[in-house]
Amino acid sequence: GLERNHRKMIKRMPKVGHEETTIELWLALSEIYRSRLNDIHAAIQCFEVAVQLASNNLTLHEGLAALYLSGGPDFVDNS
């Protein structure tokens, strides 16, 4: 479904030149996992990729920290 379509779009993205779009796709995929599939672990993994692509974006780091906290004890040390 929607998750698979986002993964396909990410795969088709060029490695350079469209970083913002790629980041947005990873964030959207993270949200799909979090809110629709209730898979916080996969949501965190996708968000981590987005943060790696935009490591200087403080807002993304804050969002990832919030996800870590909602992920429970397994992730609290990462936040």
Image (cartoon, rainbow, N blue to C red):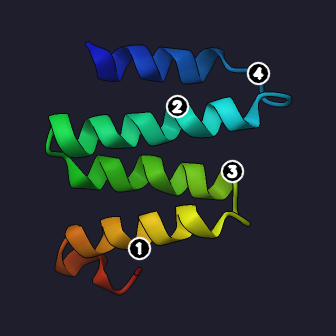
Amino acid type at circle 1 is Ala
* Residue 47 vertical position relative to residue 76 in the rendered view, above or below: above
Q: Name the residue under label 4.
A: 14
As measured in the structure, the alpha-carbon distance from the residue carrying label 1 to the one carrying label 2 is: 19 Å
- Image point (26%, 39%), residue name: 33
The dot on residue 53 is 3
Disc 2 is placed on an element classified as: helix
The dot on residue 25 is 2
- Where residue 27 appears, as percent x and y from the top left, is 47, 42
* Residue 65 vertical position relative to residue 49 in the rendered view, above or below: below
Decide: few, some or many residues near mark 3? Use Cα within 10 Å; few <14, some 14-19, many ≥20: some
* Residue 76 vertical position relative to residue 18 in the rendered view, above or below: below
| Quadrant that contains the C terminus | bottom left
The residue mark sitting in front, 4 or 1, is 1
- Image point (56%, 36%), residue name: 24
Which one is nearer the viewer's eye here, 16 or 28? Answer: 28
Direction from residue 13 to residue 78 in the image, left or right: left
The dot on residue 65 is 1
Which is more N-terminal, label 2 or label 1?
A: 2
| Quadrant that contains the N terminus | top left
- Where residue 71 appears, as percent x and y from the top left, is 22, 67
Which is more N-terminal, label 4 or label 3?
A: 4
- Residue occupying the far bottom of the picture: 77
Disc 4 is placed on an element classified as: loop
Amino acid type at circle 3 is Leu
As measured in the structure, the alpha-carbon distance from the residue carrying label 2 to the one carrying label 3 is: 12 Å
Disc 3 is placed on an element classified as: helix
Amino acid type at circle 4 is Pro
Amino acid type at circle 2 is Leu
Direction from residue 60 to residue 74 in the image, left or right: left
* Residue 69 vertical position relative to residue 16 in the rendered view, above or below: below
Which is more N-terminal, label 2 or label 4?
A: 4
